[in-house]
Image: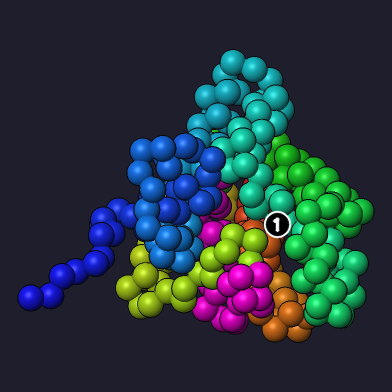
Amino acid sequence: MQISLNTSKWYDNLWAALIFFTRLPLWRIHQPPRQCYRAVVEYWPLVGWLTGGITAAVIFFGHHAMPYSVAILLAVAIRLLLTGALHEDGLCDFFDGFGGGGTDRNRILAIMKDSRTGTYGVVGLVVYELLLVASLLSLPPMVAALTVFAADPFAKMVAGQVIMMMPYARTEEESKAKTVYRRPGIKAGVGMALQGLLPMAAFIYLTRGYTDWQYVIFMPCLVMYALYLLIWHRLRGYTGDCCGAMFLLVELTVYITVSCCYSQY
């Protein structure tokens, strides 16, 4: 008689993704097995439904009770609290490493692992946040809310492709999270595509009168590919910081592209 040692539940991978990518205290309710954290990227876009949905709701409902600019800033702040600024931390490390490390692979990795934030990281994060707020403010509240809800999971789907395009740059013991993401299989890849594309498809349909879907899809993918080439050229592999930075920059590209499209109408 064979005894199965697999005690994982059907929802453990998604639960692990929610614990990993947000600061919701879900671990108090249930702690998935350690191996589930290797699959969190496969549910990253679905987590974006939650973070993007909450951010969008704050923008849409908040502008009825306060100035629109305050609602945008509040929405950005709430997302930072919800995610623990996980991706923003990666963006800072990415700018520091690639800005201060030159072409020296080991130096870039060492800087990115350093907990201290340097000049490149501070300046890069400030410019990113300014562009984020400005692009959202340029849109009407309803459009801004729809854009956020679509862009969050879509950008996570696009950024998540990097783990299928190159190996991890460090060993598992050297990683910050002590976990190396597994490469998604065909089933997981289809799942990621659905998670990222369904909100974007709804957004394109609802805004078909004043957005060009070709640009909204193509420009973020172009930015992702450019970042992929940079990371591959410098590191020959990805890190968690690279994934977080790629997500934010791809997402920002969606906002800027929609803002540019809307300004033409």
Query: Could you say which quadrant of the image residue 174 lies in?
Result: bottom right
Q: Residue at x 55, y 29 (%)?
A: 58
Stretch of the chain drawn in magenta: 148-174
- Viewer can see residue 149: no
Question: Which secondary structure dominates the residues rendered in magenta?
Answer: helix
126 left or right of 228 in image: right
Q: Which residue is mark 1?
A: 90
80 left or right of 42 in image: right
Q: Quadrant of the N terminus?
A: bottom left
Q: Which x, y percent locates residue 164?
A: 52, 78
Q: Residue at x 73, y 40 (%)?
A: 133
Query: Could you say which quadrant of the image residue 83 lies in?
Result: top right
Q: Residue at x 48, y 57 (%)?
A: 44
Asked if residue 230 lies in the magenta stretch, the reply is: no
Give the camera-side residue of 255 and 115: 115
Q: Residue at x 62, y 42 (%)?
A: 84
Tell me the element at label 1: helix
Q: Which x, y percent locates residue 223?
A: 68, 68
Q: How is the image coloured?
A: rainbow
- Residue 96 lies, with reference to residue 89, above or below; the image says below
- Residue 47 lies, with reference to residue 165, above or below; the image says above
Give the camera-side residue of 107 and 183: 107
- Viewer can see residue 4: yes
- Residue 80 lies, with reference to residue 240, above or below; the image says above
Give the camera-side residue of 3 and 128: 3
Residue type indicated by callout 1: Gly
Asked if residue 158 lies in the magenta stretch, the reply is: yes
